[in-house]
Amino acid sequence: MKAVRIHEFGGPEVLRWEDVPDAKPRKDQVLVRVRACAMNHLDIWVRKGLPGVKLPHIPGSDVAGEIVEVGEYVTGFTPGQRVLLAPMHFCNHCAKCVAGLQNQCPEFTVRGFGVEGGNCELVAAPAVSVIPIPDNFDFNQAASVPLVFLTAWHMLVGRGGLRPGQTVLVLGASSGVGIAAIQVAKLFHARVITTAGSEAKLEKARALGADHGINHYQQKISDEVKTFTSKEGVDIVIEHVGEATWEQSMKCLKPAGTLVTCGATTGPNASFDLRFLYSRQLSLLGSYMGTMGELYEVLGHIFAGRLKAVVDKTFGLQDVRAAHEYMEKSQMFGKVVLNP
Ligand SMILES: [Zn+2]
């Protein structure tokens, strides 16, 4: 089969379009023909070099496609069935996994990071991670859902304990997690404040339901949040920007507010005054992907049309270098999807 592989870490030039042996399913696995593989920022981190990536490596976390072969021990699936793959890899038999807490499994990692991914024509996956999609559901849409919507759901609902009517600040409206978090927060009838680098992006965020937009190049986030909330602050901040926004994010919280972070795009070294943390009784929470139960929950809303993935642009899989370059320019609003 054809696959995108990296043999060394670096810029887009390390992405090679090459022939590799066909993926072969074990008896407990399902073989899926990849129709769409959505990109995430993780693809870029993996390409640049992350501890835990074994070379050569096939990137790509979010796969949708058709089943071509079903392992002997697998029941309930048939060749030709349209499916997506959960982007999580876990052992499925430890105490955490059987309790439904797959993202706390000692073996937990992400497809396309700790295990090989979907930037190829065929993927063999354990049956537990294969999820049917409706007949008329577009593969590009399906591939654009799992990682970012699961991440946003786990941050807001699983970790943040979002309740109806709360006020949420979502940083980075145009990112995959931002687009998902705005919609999940609105599903809970929260008031949503969001940030972006241009008026055009803020307009799209409002179309998704955001109540208030802040241009983070022209306005100070904490000042705008104070004005919009009558000096109160927000209940939950959805953070994934890191160093560049951390101080602002903490300032935006109301007393006993909660900051949930799933990333550090601008750098990992945030600092803050401990006195501010305890005197205002703030909660700082980390969040990493989510559970299979949460993925099924969020997909229920997706398939019912209450939440919607936004696809910005598609590329042929052989044009993966152009796709990485496009993504690194950060001009998109929504997902970049690769089609084998
Ligand atoms: Zn486990």
Image (tube, grey):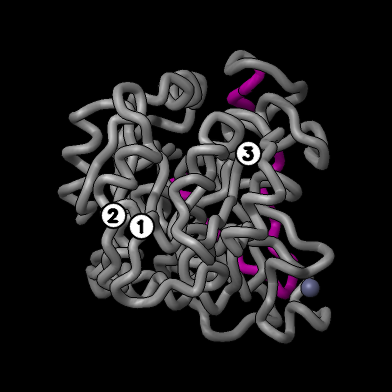
In the picture provided, is 331 more to the left or to the right than 148?
left
Q: Nearer the viewer, residue 313 or 30?
A: 313
| Residue matched to label 2 | 229
Is 315 located above or below residue 235 in the figure?
above
Q: Residues within 10 Å of mark 3 (few under 14, many from 20)?
A: many
Q: Which mark is residue 232?
A: 1
Quadrant (top left, top right, bottom left, bottom right) of the N terminus: top right
Does 234 appear in magenta? no
**What's the magenta region?**
14-37
Is 293 located above or below residue 187 in the figure?
below
Amino acid type, label 2: Thr
Q: Position of residue 138 (x, y in %)?
A: 29, 56
Q: Residue at x 81, y 63 (%)?
A: 107
Q: Residue at x 49, y 62 (%)?
A: 255
Mark 3 vs 1: CB contact within 8 A: no
Circle 3: element type: loop
Q: Residues within 10 Å of mark 2 (few under 14, many from 20)?
A: some
In the picture provided, is 241 more to the left or to the right than 47?
left
In the picture provided, is 209 more to the left or to the right than 139?
left
How far is the residue under mark 3 from the one under mark 2? 42 Å
Q: Position of residue 228 (x, y in %)?
A: 25, 49
Question: Is residue 3 in view from this perspective?
Answer: no
Question: Is residue 327 in view from this perspective?
Answer: yes
| Rendering quadrant holding ligand 1 | bottom right
Q: Looking at the image, how many numbered discs can be counted on the residues?
A: 3
Q: Residues within 10 Å of mark 1 (few under 14, many from 20)?
A: some
| Residue matched to label 3 | 59
